[in-house]
Amino acid sequence: MDYIHNVLTPPQLLRIGTSCLNDILHRLRSNSIESPKANAEFDIDRENGFLPAYPLQRLPLAFEFWERALDEASDVLGLGDDISEEALERRAGGEAWRQRIREGPLIPTHTIESDNRVLQRAHHVLAFLTHYYVHSTPPTEDGAPFVIPKTLAIPFTRISKLLGIAPILTYADTVLWNAYPINPGLPMTLDNMRFQHVFSGTDDEEEFYRTSASVELRGVELLQIIEEFHNLPNVTDNTAIWKIARDLQRVTSLIGELSDITQSVRAGCDPHVFHWRIRPWFNGSDAGGPSSPGWIYDGVDSSDRLDLSGPSGGQSTTVHTLDIWLDIDHKLSQKRHPAPSDENKRADHGFMERMRRYMPGQHRSYLEYLQNAPRSLRELARQSPALREPYNAAVMALKKFRDYHIRIACLYIVTMSKTARYSCPVIASIMKEQQKASATGPSTQMSKSDLLKRWEEYVDKIHYSERYCDDHFEYRHVILPKPLLKLVPKHYFNPDDQSTLRLLTEKEWRSIGITQSLGWVHYEVHTPEPHVLLFRRELNFQQQLAPDGRPTGQLNRNAGRK
Ligand code: HEM
């Protein structure tokens, strides 16, 4: 298929139109508000911080080949190591897509090299294409490095160099340059925000990006406070000290909100889905460990020296800004009290510094500017008794943020790595039935791995309806493939009518293979169609999660706004 010469479809024309409209509206709005000079110089938006107010949603026509390939990717590609029947059926289409990429045009980039927003879009598109290309390829045993074709590698490295960012999928690609306002006339908030590209096609992936974006939006207030701190004419009089103390209290509670936001990921992003269906797309060249062959960027000099780890929250400039302002010493190079614990000493002290290479160059420059600023908050707090307590409280809040975050990271990664990709008590129950049957008669047993494979294929075919609402609940129905219903343990069925399921607990419906975020309740069975399960969830459920994941009603969905 020749992407360039095909006529644009109406949705694509609409997207180009919306993108132009966004740009015009943004220019109008930014002309009416004078941006603080220092922050604007670092591509920091007055209202959206490190998120651009309006990311470009489509490249100019000369780059239509890339945009079309990305439009098509989510329909034809799946993870290369997925061996379900459906995935195997799609493999030929996937190989055809990759062939088109390999044989496509090497598009020159000189026409866009002076336009930051277009370069950002180009990075975003090429990053998604590269990760689609790598991770949709079925694994081989040959131990050779993975070759990224020239058609992606050359423009991707060139554009990355101009932006000062690593040539790989970064936090900027998945979060900062992926978010767009649903209604371009309104400010970007959690409710007025969508993400243009998700690898897995799941709501969970979008929710994962939304959590980070909401940390970024909430961080805007921090950027303003820091700018004001550096612009204070002096920091010796009582008025200035009083203002700094009050601002530190604001920052402490703001960091508390960042902890709540990070915890809220559990409401919309299922850990199992994250670990097995989303995270594999993020892996960079080093994901297989130091001895793995990694990736080669064809046609690029010294490709082995490129920074090619995948995206991480560690690339959030907001979190680095907090670290620098509060003078958190990740490298343990300063003498501090209390002295670092043994655990701290064993940590990777260079991690945060490495992560800066995965940030847009202008944001990294902002961090350098902060780091070199003549005024040190920590030093001031040491000298001013009135600031010590609020300063220490802010540092403790940041420590708490990291403590909460590490628990989430463990749940989503360490705990999930111990689960089977398709874990299933259903299989255990069938195995039990088989064992009972073979004790009393001739054996017709299937092996556990055959059963598992069959079950995986059915699970992939579970259909999740769109959500629909009334005044109190959102609803959706889940349709099990009929052969899967036959594998469901007998005790999940209505004792009075073995043809219909009874109402299942969350643990039970998850054990069948249904994956949904928290809060959904199986509330009704539909007798004529026993394979259709009806679910509902309270409309404001997502707002109600406390830091530990329990409902409270505390979380503000508009947390990105003051
Ligand atoms: C489901 C949600 C999350 C998971 C599973 C997760 C996982 C991880 C993991 C595994 C790391 C270790 C380094 C790496 O492999 O990249 C990490 C680091 C980091 N993440 Fe997250 N993360 C999540 C949400 C967030 C959010 C919302 C933020 C805020 C923007 C964030 C900020 C960070 C930071 C700053 C680091 C660097 C290490 C540190 O400063 O403690 N993460 N994350």
Image: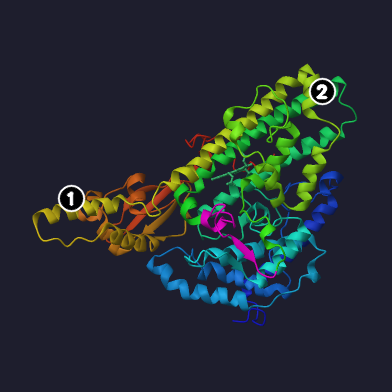
Which residue does the numbered mark 1 point to in the structure image? 496
From the top left corner, tell me how far across and down residue 194 is, in percent. 61, 56
Amino acid carrying label 1: it is Asp
From the top left corner, tell me how far across and down residue 99 is, in percent. 57, 76
- The answer to which of marks 2 and 1 sits earlier in the sequence is 2
Residue at the farthest left position? 440
From the top left corner, tell me how far across and down residue 363 is, in percent. 76, 48
At 19% from the left and 60% from the top, the residue drawn is 445
Q: Nearer the viewer, mark 2 or mark 1?
A: 2
Amino acid carrying label 2: it is Ile
In this rendering, would 125 be left or right of 95? Answer: right
Which residue does the numbered mark 2 point to in the structure image? 241
Seen in the picture, residue 512 relative to 349 is either above or below; the reply is below
Magenta segment: does it hold 101?
A: no
Q: Nearer the viewer, residue 522 or 118?
A: 118
Residue 261, by quadrant, is top right
Q: What crowding class fits label 2: few (fewer than 14 Cα within 10 Å), some (14-19), or many (20 or more)?
A: some
The residues colored magenta run 279-299
In this rendering, would 121 be left or right of 174? Answer: right
